[in-house]
Amino acid sequence: MVVERPAGRSGRGNSLLVSALRFAGYDLDYRPATPTPTPTPSSETDPAKAGAVSAGGEEYSGIPAEDVDRHVYQMRDRLWDVYPYACVGRFRFISLEFTADAYYQVALFRLLRAQTESETDDNETRLLDVGCCVGQVLRKLVFDGVDSSRLYGTDVEPRFLDIGFDLFRDRDKFQGGFVVGDLLQQNTGDERLDAFDGRMTFIHATSFFHLFTWDDQVRAATRMVRFLQPERRDVMIFGRQVGTTSPRDNGKAGSDKVYLHNANSWQRLWDEVGELTSTKWKTTMESTETIETGAGGVESSLKKMTFCVSRG
């Protein structure tokens, strides 16, 4: 099985990072006192070496190098038994591809900076990963130097969270919090997620919005707005999702059709969310690559997208 590799850094990536920092209003002259370098991705196709477990994970989790392959395959099989997602079969749960995204670097930059500053509990800089699966994004942030007490995750499937602790072997040392909950149930009262209300600076949401219809995306987004710290201007929602050059419902006839976005429809969605929540949002969405649809063909309208949502 060929595993997708993290994208390497490039001049274009650095330019995107600078643009992202400026977009978010950060002081580009500031540098964290002890920055943690991001490991250089390998060109090998071994799944364990493609992701978080090997990229510092041996040190983080205490897994001996000779046991990494077996351990990752065991965790993959457990995840597959919960739900046979294609991304599980392809070891996406240990991919470090997201670390090349400009807005991941913005969040990391800001979280590290906050650790050198004096903050009250109300305005402490925190990140929530929604639909976090095994929590690989959170563990990568810890590896990059972020105090885990600032990091939180939520998923509708409790077994994913449990497997995450076993994958990274940090049940007793990860100091953040995980909550099982459904972002679509705010109207009927999924009170478990209320613990996050008004407490988050950043929300990471990769491979999340493209799972839902337009209406359900609006429901999830309005719930996320409640999670954000209301008095902070620098809050941000970011991640990756499948998008398209021609925004549309996408799905089988007779089923609930998920909605895929381009930059314009993504802004329209957040305009609607803003009206519902008496807030205002500006968005960016950028294509990173075309998605191959199999059998040697390429569907030119389907794209991998990175996105950011911040206060307007």
Image (cartoon, rainbow, N blue to C red):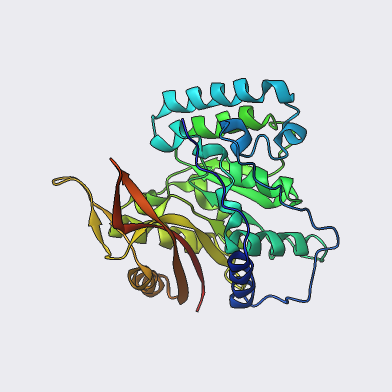
Residue drawn at (58%, 41%) of the image: 135
The image position of residue 302, as x and y in percent, is 32, 56
Which one is in front, 53 or 150? 53
> Position of 49 compared to 226: left or right?
right
Residue drawn at (61%, 48%) of the image: 152
> Position of 294 compared to 25: left or right?
left
**Vertical placement of 55 versus 115: above or below?**
above
> Position of 94 compared to 84: left or right?
right
Q: Give the image quarter of residue 54.
A: top right
The image position of residue 175, as x and y in percent, is 72, 42
**Vertical placement of 206 versus 234: above or below?**
above
Q: From where the camera sits, is residue 124 visible?
A: no
Outermost residue, left side:
254
Residue drawn at (78%, 76%) of the image: 29
Residue drawn at (81%, 64%) of the image: 32
The image position of residue 171, as x and y in percent, is 68, 31
Q: Give the image quarter of residue 12.
A: bottom right
The image position of residue 308, as x and y in percent, is 50, 66
> Position of 86 compared to 128: left or right?
left
**Vertical placement of 130 versus 272: above or below?**
above
Which one is in front, 62 or 111? 62
The number of discs equals 0
